[in-house]
């Protein structure tokens, strides 16, 4: 059977992952080797070995399979494990209780890495509030239509590839 090193994947700020190759068949032997990036394979012949000391970015490994007696041709497959940097925890800002206004300033933290995005978690009206200048601005302003007053929950989510952090705030218009 052809070698299968498992699917390429991203991991969020983890220095250790388990590899997911398919085992060699018919008494053959599989062997891991690190092609690029970093990593220490705890057991080079275990298809689901632990891989530790991953560097940020792409880490490529080869799973090479040979037959038991060398009769059948060997094969290999490459897997890429990308270690993504986790952003600082999202902070949406403080809850607000407002009177006689249809707009409120937002004050989230700026993403250390990745992109922050505002979204509406809950709302008392059918119409979404408007976030200006855009939903990626941590210090945007949220506006509702007059007559749609009530309690809104907004989420500030920061995403960097496989890493995600979210915080919510409540605004009572």
Image: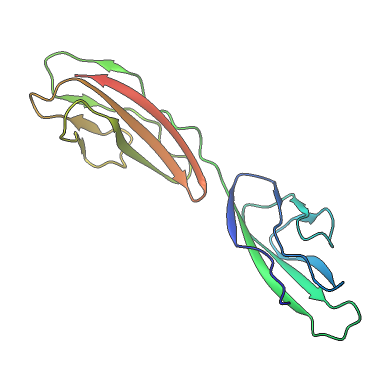
Position of 62 relative to 172 (above/below): below
Residue 26 point in image, percent of width and height: 84, 74
Q: Which quarter of the rendered picture does the N terminus lie within?
A: bottom right
Position of 169 relative to 138 (above/below): above
> On the rendered structure, is 123 left or right of 38?
left
Residue 94 point in image, percent of width and height: 35, 19
Figure coloring: rainbow
Q: Which quarter of the rendered picture does the C terminus lie within?
A: top left
**Relative depth, front residue between 110 and 120:** 120
Position of 121 relative to 171 (above/below): below
**Relative depth, front residue between 163 and 24:** 24
Residue 139, quarter of the rendered image = top left
Residue 17 point in image, percent of width and height: 69, 49
Residue at 37 percent across and 34 percent down: it is 156
Residue at 24 percent across and 42 percent down: it is 134
Residue at 65 percent across and 63 percent down: it is 6
Residue 116 point in image, percent of width and height: 38, 41
**Relative depth, front residue between 151 and 114:** 151
Residue 40, quarter of the rendered image = bottom right
């Amino acid at each position: 059977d052809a070698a299968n090193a498992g699917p390429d994947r991203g991991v969020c700020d983890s220095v250790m992952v388990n590899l997911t190759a398919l085992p060699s068949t018919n008494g053959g032997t599989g062997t891991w080797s690190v092609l690029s990036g970093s990593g220490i394979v705890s057991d080079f012949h275990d298809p689901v070995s632990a891989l530790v000391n991953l560097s940020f970015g792409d880490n490529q490994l080869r799973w090479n399979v040979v037959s038991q007696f060398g009769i059948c041709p060997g094969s290999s497959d490459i897997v890429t494990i990308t270690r993504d940097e986790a952003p600082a925890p999202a902070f949406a800002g403080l809850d607000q209780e407002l009177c006689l206004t249809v707009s409120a300033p937002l004050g989230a933290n700026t993403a250390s890495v990745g992109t922050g995005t505002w979204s509406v978690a809950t709302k008392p009206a059918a119409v979404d509030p408007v976030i200006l200048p855009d939903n990626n601005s941590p210090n945007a302003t949220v506006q509702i239509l007059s007559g749609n007053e009530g309690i809104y929950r907004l989420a500030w989510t920061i995403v960097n590839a496989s890493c995600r952090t979210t915080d919510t705030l409540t605004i009572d218009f």
